[in-house]
Image (cartoon, rainbow, N blue to C red):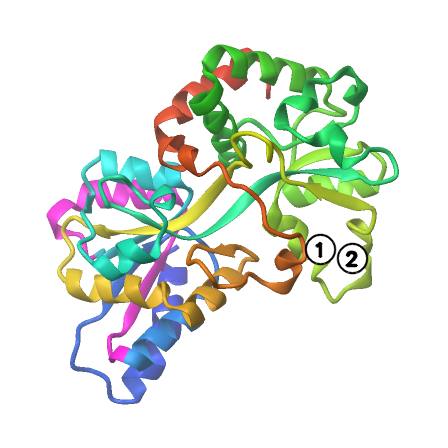
Amino acid sequence: MKFVAAFLTLLVAGPALAAGHTGHPPLTVYSDRHQTEDAAVFEEFTKATGIPVELVDEDFDPLFERLTKEGPQTPADLILSVGAATLWRCAEAGLLQPIASDAVLQAVPADLRDKNSQWVGLAYWARVIAYQKDKFEPADVADYEDLTDPKFQGQILVRSASSLYNQALVASMIASQGAVPTETWARGLVANLARPPQGGDTNQLQAMADGEGSVSIINTHYWARFAASDKVTEQEVVANVGVAFPNQANRGTEIDIAGAGISRWSSHAKAATQLLEFLLKPDAQRQFAAANFEYPVVSGVEPAPVLAGLGPFKIDGLAVGKLGKFAPEADAAMARAGWE
């Protein structure tokens, strides 16, 4: 991972340094997002401000351990992470400081940021139900709860319980329905599986195309990668796939975020705040979100055309700030339900 961090540091900071912007020390971003396209956004920030960005990219657990061990000696200024639960863990561990920028807090809807302002969402995706259009109708999958219906026996494809995406979905259900009803739902889902949970969301879509099942739970950005692909073979994977945003008549569809918070021990908190403000400007929002086919958090900024084509939908925003709190309960509930 040191090689990855060094490479991305050169990629992000190099052009600015070559242009003579050497007056400000590098702003260090710890990220588990693994999006090489983010470097282009950081380059634009450097061009606009003269502040170089040093990007350290690793999985969350190693980054969390590193931050905890480094403490006041950490070089990290901004923590960029995939999932409200991971940012919640950072806040609970005392690794973040409150964001004081009115520009940031006013740009991000209250449901998509920490109630104590220690982290904010920068982009989001929805966990939706994908279905074969020649076998089911949108009304068949109107709610997540519908997936326990016996008509779906042997039809449902899903990734494992260890997936942070599935843990977030179950945590959101616990937040709104309670632990017992959610565990009952998980048991009903398991009873309808077409095969043992495995692979990622793209694997579920491919399995649908291969006839292994006809319904799956996926994130919108995985579907969008196929739908927007310039490869006919990938477009064909989702040609017969409908996308349903569940629970539109009640709590809304579960979403999760890619977001960020300022390190508690940041040596350049002002510059970190500037970066957050920059990432929430319309042009940067489009670029940052489009890199992974995500939805921008700033109102009025359109998502990528492939997502815009799905239309607007009601989100379960109230659950976002609770995903970390209920993640352990979600993990336990899935285990008891036999969700491998």
Tell me the element at label 1.
Answer: helix
User: As drawn, which residue projects farthest toward the right?
Assistant: 134
Could you tell whether 268 is left or right of 303 in the image? Answer: left
Over which residues does the magenta segment extend?
A: 49-75
Q: Residue 100 versus residue 13: which sits nearer the camera?
A: 100
Residue 282 lies, in percent from the top left, at 42, 68
Query: Label 2 sits on what residue type?
Result: Gln
For disc 2, the neighbor class at 10 Å (few under 14, some 14 to 19, many from 20) is: some
Q: Quadrant of residue 205?
A: top right
Look at the image and say whether residue 42 sits in the magenta stretch. Answer: no
Q: Which residue is mark 1?
A: 226
**Can residue 58 be seen by looking at this rendering?**
yes
Marks 1 and 2, how far apart at CA: 5 Å
Above or below residue 64? Residue 57 is below
Could you tell whether 169 is left or right of 201 in the image? Answer: left
Q: Which residue is mark 2?
A: 235
Residue 301 lies, in percent from the top left, at 48, 63
Q: Residue 250 versus residue 235: which sits nearer the camera?
A: 250
Query: Label 1 sits on what residue type?
Result: Phe
Above or below residue 188? Residue 263 is below
Residue 4 lies, in percent from the top left, at 41, 61
Q: Given contact means CB atoms under 8 Å apart, are the residues at marks 1 and 2 in contact? A: yes
Q: Residue at x 42, y 32 (%)?
A: 319
Q: Residue at x 85, y 36 (%)?
A: 211
Tell me the element at label 2.
Answer: helix
Looking at the image, tell me whether mark 1 or mark 2 is earlier in sequence order.
1
Q: Residue at x 76, y 37 (%)?
A: 131
